[in-house]
Amino acid sequence: MAIRSNLLAEGVEDIIESVLTSTADEVLVANPTADVIEGLVTVATELGEGLPQIRLVADESVLKSVMDDFIIASNAANLVVEDVLSMRTSNGAVENTLFVTPNTVVALVGAGGKVAGLVTDDESFVETALEAHRGHWEDAPEFKLRTPPLSRVRETLADDIGKETLDDFDAVLSSLSSARGDGDGLDEVTISLLVAARNEVLLYDISKWGEDVGIASKATFSRTKTKLEELGLIDTEKVPIDVGRPRLRLKLGNDQLADSDIDELASAAEQMLEA
């Protein structure tokens, strides 16, 4: 059923949910801001089923910035794999964000800390807008998302490393609002190494898993391990093997971290990284 009246909300996610649940066909999203892209991925992930085809055309620099957050990017990758979300790029300046469905056009307008969704269901206008934005979509280059789907990350982490490490990984992600690194949440490599250290996993095993699943290269894992070790967040001990150099077992290198509950591990690690 189409949206029949204008929408007013404190945040953009309520409007996005109204749009996504108003049609089972398709939603063309034109000129989304970073907040809209994040909200779209979050709401679609939470709704889970019965979603329309979401075709998004956004400024490339905005998309890249949003997808630097592992939490958003890995959930977006889930939606891509499930054939719900497709993302393409444009270089046009962001003006009003539009949601175009076969029944309605919704324009987002922000003012005074609130967001309004201005709706029209005029048949002729909607048909013209849908045709125009389908054309825009078809002409836009595909945005190649490099982050692996979170579902694949979780499945392989349990299979290759262990269920206990997966449970810790999930708990750390749940405690973070973002996972970008650089002072805005821990990045995915740091999270992986910390939960591996909490479970005393070999560096070789976690870095091989991370490279195989597409999180980062073994070299990136090694560099990050060295940084965390220098800062005292993790420690290592040598484990002899039959042939070749000993491998390194990861351990938490600080009593504060070792004594933290898993849902407090991320904040404790962030405090140490910022010190």
Image: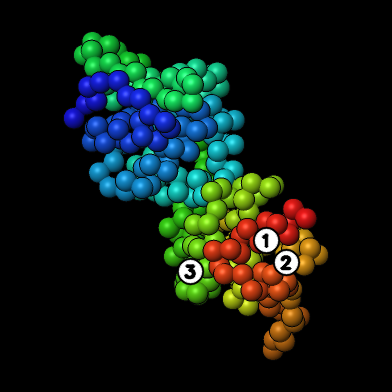
The residue lying toward the viewer, choosing from 10 and 135, is: 10
Label 1 – label 2 distance at C-alpha: 7 Å
Disc 3 element: helix
**Label 2 sits on residue:** 233
Q: Locate the C terminus by quadrant.
A: bottom right
Most extreme residue toward the bottom is: 242
The residue lying toward the viewer, choosing from 34 and 143, is: 34
Query: Can residue 270 be seen in this snapshot?
Result: yes
Tag 3–tag 2 contact (CB < 8 Å): no
Label 3 – label 2 distance at C-alpha: 20 Å
Counting from the top left corner in percent of width and height, residue 22 is at 24, 32
Q: Dot 1: few (<14), some (14–19), or many (≥20) neighbours within 10 Å?
A: many
Tag 1–tag 3 contact (CB < 8 Å): no
**Label 1 sits on residue:** 269
| Amino acid tagged 2 | Leu
The residue lying toward the viewer, choosing from 7 and 224, is: 7
- Nearer the viewer's eye, disc 1 or disc 3? 1
Tag 1–tag 2 contact (CB < 8 Å): yes
Image height of 182 relative to 64, above or below: below
**Label 3 sits on residue:** 167
Mark on residue 180? Answer: none
For the point 31% across and 31% down, the residue is 19
Counting from the top left corner in percent of width and height, residue 164 is at 50, 74
Image height of 2 relative to 132, above or below: below
First reached walking from the N terminus: tag 3 or tag 2: 3
Q: How many marks?
A: 3
